[in-house]
Amino acid sequence: MRRITIGMLTFFSLFLAVASAQSAERWAELPAFPPMPTPKTSGMADVNDIKMYFAEYGEGDPILFIHGGLGNADVWGHQVADFAKDHLVIVADSRGHGRSTRSQQPFGYDLMTSDYVALLDYLKIGKVTLVGWSDGGIIGIDMAMKNPEKLTRVIAQAANVTTDGVKADVMNNKTFADYINVAGEYYKKLSPTPNEYDAFVNQISEMWATQPTWTAADLGKITVPVTLAIGDHDEAVKLDHTEMMAKQIPGAKLIILKDASHFAMLQDPAGYDAMIRDSMAGR
């Protein structure tokens, strides 16, 4: 039998310590979606050519949270619990996501933006602070260009404005793959078409492959205050792309979320909520 020396034990101890530290990095993990508080109102709104799930919580200045692609409103459990203490919080499932239906129309950011504008009209809500994650952030930027009258400000995390802002190897990332699987399980539980997740992913993927395609001139017309946030370990969106967006959107503020990835709202909810409050306070 091979003799194990003190030096070898020290090496193995260091190796295990490093491996443990790496596995414990919060940016490398996908925490579970937190439980959602009980809404004061919820339902299915007739919006454009779909039925769109929505829920409202709390009272005060309104905040609309928009989830990312393949996901649903339940990703915002931490934020709803916090902001419903002093704000009217609105969440919804984008078309084809979660509990909302989809139609034969191809998915597109302009179309989904028009859904949220119609939802705000349905709920008789004027201006909102829009907090959008990933596709939700793209919808926020789209609304800032097309419907600025609906917005007090936009806080967009992990958004891109051209397709080359997305990392080429994102689908090879374990954390992102875990998210796709979790989103699939939620889809089976929530969707009115629970057995069509693969078809839904294919439809969304077609949109991702071709949209958005906004130019510096497009972004330069934005007049709404915009905060751009990105995790320092984002698996999907390039940091330099986000930095470029911050230069092209007039007055935009850039925030790097420390030790967080594409899923920062789950990995560091306290830091994420503080970022939102600082942005709303103009800090």
Image (cartoon, rainbow, N blue to C red):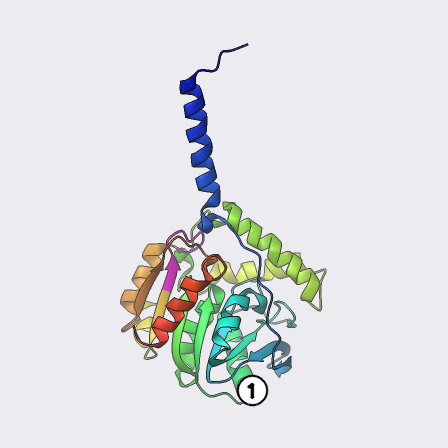
Q: Which amino acid lies under the numbered mark 1 shown in the image of this protein?
A: Leu
Q: In this orientation, does residue 159 appear? A: no
Measured from the top left, where is residue 118 in percent x and y?
A: 54, 83
**Residue at left offset 55%, top offset 9%:** 1
User: Residue 125, how many percent across, how many down?
Assistant: 50, 87
Q: Left or right of 195: which side holds 242? A: left
Using the image as rendered, state which of residue 7 and residue 246 is in the foreground.
Answer: 7
Quadrant in the picture for residue 21: top left
Please provide percent x and percent y for residue 139.
46, 71
Of residue 170 and residue 186, the one placed in the foreground of this image is 186
Question: Who is closer to the viewer here, 50 or 258?
Answer: 258
The C terminus, quarter of image: bottom left
Q: Which of 275 and 205 is in front in this view?
A: 275
- In the rendered view, tell whether residue 1 sits above or below residue 137: above
**The stretch drawn in magenta includes residue 230:** yes
Return the residue at label 1.
Answer: 123
The correct choice, above or below, for 256 with respect to 24 in the image is below
Residue segment shown in magenta: 229-237
Residue in view at x 45 percent, y 22 percent: 9
The extreme top residue here reads: 1
Q: Main secondary structure of the magenta part?
A: loop
Q: Residue at x 31, y 64 (%)?
A: 254
Is residue 160 one of those drawn in magenta? no
Report crowding for label 1: few under 14, some 14 to 19, many 20 or more residues within 10 A (C-alpha): few
Q: Is residue 22 above or below residue 106?
A: above
Q: In which quarter of the image is residue 276?
A: bottom left
